[in-house]
Image: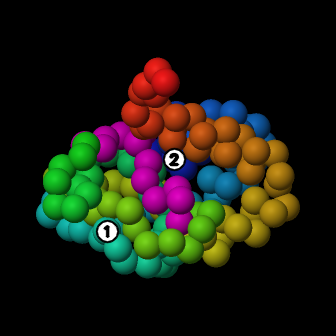
Amino acid sequence: MIFSPLGTLKNVALFAEVPLSDCVEIAEQFKEHTFPAGATITTEGEPGPSVLAFFVIVDGRATVTVGGEARGTLGPGDYFGEISLIEDVPRSATVTADTDLHCYALSAWEFRPFVESHPKIAWAMLKGLAKRVGDQAPASRPL
C-alpha cells in the first residue's frame, strides 16, 4: 500500500479546515515511521517535545492508557501528541502499538516555525483542537 503525507493529512480532522496550500507545505515536514507491535510510542509523564512530537496513524492500531487504564484505541486517521506541538508539557498518556504501526510524525521544532509563518494554519488547528477537547469533555450538568 502506498501512502502520502498529504493524502493522510487531508483525512485528519485536526487539518480539516487548513487550506490545501498550507497542507501541502506542512506535509513536506512529516517523516514516515514504523513501530513494531508492542512498542511504546509515547509514555505518560515523559517530556512531550522529544524528537517526534505529533503522530498521524496511517495503518495499524494502538492503545491509549492513562494511569495504567486503557482509555481508547487509535487507528488509521487518528492522531496523538498534538499538545506537544504547542506546549512543552509532559505526555498525558501512554500510546502502545497493538499491531505494527505505520505513522507520519512531526517534531515541534519543525512545526513551530511553519505555524509562525502561516497563521491560517494556526487558527484552523486551534479550531480543531477546541472541537476535540469539547468532544471529550463530560456533559455539563444543570445548575
Q: Which class describes the residues within 10 Å of circle 1: few (<14), some (14-19), or many (20+)?
A: some
- Camera-near label (2 vs 1) is 1
Residue at horizontal 62 percent and vertical 53 percent from the top: 27
Q: Return the residue at label 1.
A: 44
Query: Is residue 2 located in the magenta-colored stretch of the structure?
Result: no
Query: Is residue 76 located in the magenta-colored stretch of the structure?
Result: yes
In the image, 96: left or right of 8? left
Above or below, comparing residue 61 to residue 85 in the picture:
above
Task: Name which quarter of the figure residue 73 lies in.
Answer: top left
The kind of residue tagged 2 is: Ser
- Specify the quadrant that holds the N terminus: top left
Residue at horizontal 51 percent and vertical 47 percent from the top: 4
In the image, 101: left or right of 121? left
Which element is circle 1 on?
Answer: loop
Q: Return the residue at label 2.
A: 4
Depth check, front residue: 73 or 37: 73
Depth check, front residue: 118 or 135: 135
Depth check, front residue: 123 or 21: 123
Q: CA distance from mark 2 to mark 1?
A: 29 Å
Q: Which class describes the residues within 10 Å of circle 2: few (<14), some (14-19), or many (20+)?
A: few
The kind of residue tagged 1 is: Glu
Q: Residue 65: horizontal and vertical position, in percent?
A: 23, 56
In the image, 123: left or right of 109? right
Residue at horizontal 32 percent and vertical 61 percent from the top: 93
Furthest toward the top, the residue is 142
Which element is circle 2 on?
Answer: loop
Above or below, comparing residue 94 to residue 128 in the picture:
below
Q: Which residues are magenta?
A: 73-84
Asked if residue 7 can be seen in this view, the reply is: no
Q: Residue 126: horizontal and vertical position, in percent?
A: 67, 45
Q: Residue 87: horizontal and vertical position, in percent?
A: 60, 68
